[in-house]
Image (spheres, rainbow, N blue to C red):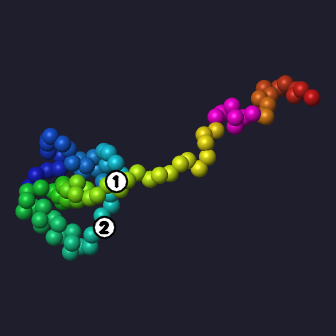
Amino acid sequence: MKESHSAEITEPASVHGPGRAPAGMPLTIRLGEQEYAALVRIARSRETTAAALVEKLVLHALSRADVPPPADSHPARRHTTYEEATAGFRPDVPAGTAPDM
């Protein structure tokens, strides 16, 4: 059986540990005990790990999926600069001095 830490041209995400995707969004797949056991048996028969097999399956599915067009959205409001946000406020008075009145 091949170790997930073996030196390959591209490292599988499983090398970085659970929940650590090197790029993109982490993916969680929940399998029952029977499904997981079947996945491990398939991975062993292919001399790989279950994590590497799932990664290959997901990447293959993503390569065949249609990419939706980008959302036509705009920010809810324009960016507020620091100067705009703090306009009308006075600087803090240093401790130990009397405020101007």
Q: Quadrant of the N terminus?
A: bottom left
Viewer-side residue, 88 vs 77? 77
Q: State yes or no: residue 95 in magenta.
A: no
Above or below, 99 relative to 51: above
- Residue at 36% over, 52% down: 25
Q: Residue furthest right?
A: 101
Q: Which residue is mark 2?
A: 30
Above or below, 31 relative to 61: below
Q: Amino acid at mark 2?
A: Arg
Q: Quadrant of the C terminus?
A: top right
**Majority secondary structure in the magenta region:** helix
Residue 82, by quadrant, is top right
Query: Across the whole image, how many numbered discs are drawn on residues?
Result: 2
The numbered disc on residue 18 is none
- Residue 16 in picture, x, y percent from top left: 28, 46
- Residue 91 in picture, x, y percent from top left: 77, 29
Q: Which residue is mark 1?
A: 26
Task: Tell me the SS state at disc 2.
Answer: loop
What distance separates the C-alpha of mark 1 from that of mark 2? Answer: 13 Å
Badge 2 local density, few (<14 within 10 Å), some, or many (20+)?
A: few
Q: Is residue 51 visible?
A: no
- Residue 29 in picture, x, y percent from top left: 30, 64
The residues colored magenta run: 81-87
Above or below, 35 relative to 12: below
Horizontal relation, residue 45 to residue 56: left or right: left
Viewer-side residue, 69 vs 4? 69
Horizontal relation, residue 87 to residue 99: left or right: left
- Residue 75 in picture, x, y percent from top left: 55, 47
Q: State yes or no: residue 82 in magenta.
A: yes
Viewer-side residue, 30 vs 63? 63
Badge 1 local density, few (<14 within 10 Å), some, or many (20+)?
A: few
